[in-house]
């Protein structure tokens, strides 16, 4: 007779048996939205394998394919494309897939930068207090008086002016990440500060002080794990905002520079196709396809965030 398995559960087994996964599997809309986000991330990672062509490879371009409507053979080459082509003959489906890589990379890295700055300043402000707390929070209040997109444009212009001219195009994507990250740190800082003010009065923090732990050890080893929950929710919200900000900046011409392209740049360039509405309604709809890709990603992320917020409020009740 086989003995029952008494080995401790693995980490994956503990995750699958958690209340979070149990609640998540009973929220079909959140599961669908998460599946869409996961699918888009996988598509972005596997873009060279999934995309029909590399739209930014000059060797793969054929100007004779320019302005080809979706699912319509080109009158010169006979080639057809699922979503049509732009004025350079680039396959729009491939361009959207490759543009997704840039948009997600900028969005994720911007969120990580904003989270790192905001969590650090929030911990220091909440735990140390005094004049340092007042200074950090007044800077945050001043930044909140301006739209984040305006702050990002200002930071982008300043950083771009500092960089030598011969490196500006190569560093544009990193300047864009810094601009968006520095414009989105305030929600992290305010949330972490408020939570730290509560946590630092609890017994485990007082016990840590009594045994002689330094401020940094208390903040990063003991308080941070207890404030990370709200931070992850804010990070998810900020990801959608960062993707929209990145697309907006690129649409305005102050973001990603050629030869790279993102969804905002595509919407700007494809907007010229509206002039072809009388010739081909499908061609005129091309900018809506790029804009729809942005909307799909941001709406899916927001559905996941809404479920997380709803679950958190239910646990508090």
Image: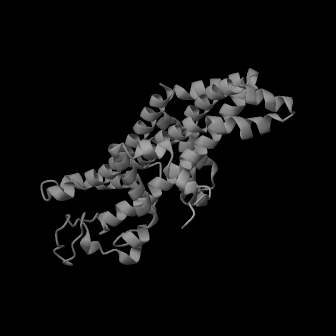
Number of disc labels: 0
Residue in view at x 56 percent, y 60 percent: 4
Instruction: Answer with the quarter of the image where residue 311 lies.
Output: top left
Residue 33 seen in render: yes
Residue in view at x 55 percent, y 35 percent: 230
Is residue 30 placed above or below 91 in the rendered structure? above
Q: Residue furthest right?
A: 212
Q: Is residue 22 left or right of residue 198?
A: left
Q: Nearer the viewer, residue 31 or 234?
A: 31
Residue 158 seen in render: no
Residue 66: x and y in percent read: 26, 68
Q: Residue furthest front?
A: 1
Q: Is residue 131 left or right of residue 149?
A: right
Q: Nearer the viewer, residue 233 or 86?
A: 233
Residue 128: x and y in percent read: 76, 27
On the rendered image, what quadrant is the N terminus found in? bottom right
Q: Residue furthest left?
A: 278
Is residue 290 placed above or below 221 in the rendered structure? below
Residue 43: x and y in percent read: 40, 63
Residue in view at x 52 percent, y 25 percent: 145
Instruction: Answer with the quarter of the image where residue 232 lies.
Output: top right
């Amino acid at each position: 007779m086989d003995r029952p398995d008494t080995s401790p559960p693995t980490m994956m087994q503990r995750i699958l048996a958690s209340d979070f996964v149990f609640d998540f599997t009973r929220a079909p809309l959140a599961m669908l939205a998460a599946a869409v986000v996961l699918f888009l991330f996988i598509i972005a990672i596997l873009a060279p394998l999934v995309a029909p062509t590399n739209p930014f490879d000059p060797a793969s371009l054929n100007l004779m394919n320019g302005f080809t409507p979706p699912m319509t053979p080109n009158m010169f080459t006979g080639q057809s494309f699922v979503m049509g082509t732009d004025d350079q003959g680039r396959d729009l489906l491939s361009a959207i897939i490759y543009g997704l890589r840039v948009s997600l990379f900028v969005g994720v890295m911007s969120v990580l930068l904003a989270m790192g700055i905001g969590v650090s300043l929030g911990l220091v402000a909440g735990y140390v207090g005094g004049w340092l707390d007042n200074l950090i929070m007044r800077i945050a209040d001043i930044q909140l008086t301006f739209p984040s997109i305006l702050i990002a444009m200002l930071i982008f212009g300043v950083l771009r002016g500092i960089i030598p001219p011969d490196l500006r195009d190569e560093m544009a994507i990193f300047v864009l990440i810094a601009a968006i990250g520095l414009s989105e740190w305030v929600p992290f800082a305010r949330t972490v500060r408020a939570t730290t003010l509560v946590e630092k009065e609890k017994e485990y923090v007082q016990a840590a002080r009594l045994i002689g732990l330094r401020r940094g050890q208390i903040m990063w080893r003991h308080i941070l794990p207890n404030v990370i929950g709200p931070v992850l929710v804010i990070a998810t919200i900020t990801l959608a905002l960062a993707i929209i900000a990145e697309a907006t900046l690129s649409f305005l011409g102050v973001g990603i520079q050629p030869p790279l392209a993102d969804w905002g740049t595509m919407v700007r360039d494809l907007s010229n196709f509206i002039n072809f509405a009388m010739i081909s309604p499908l061609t005129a709809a091309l900018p809506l396809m790029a804009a729809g890709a942005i909307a799909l990603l941001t709406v899916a992320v927001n559905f996941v965030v809404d479920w997380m917020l709803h679950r958190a409020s239910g646990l508090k009740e």
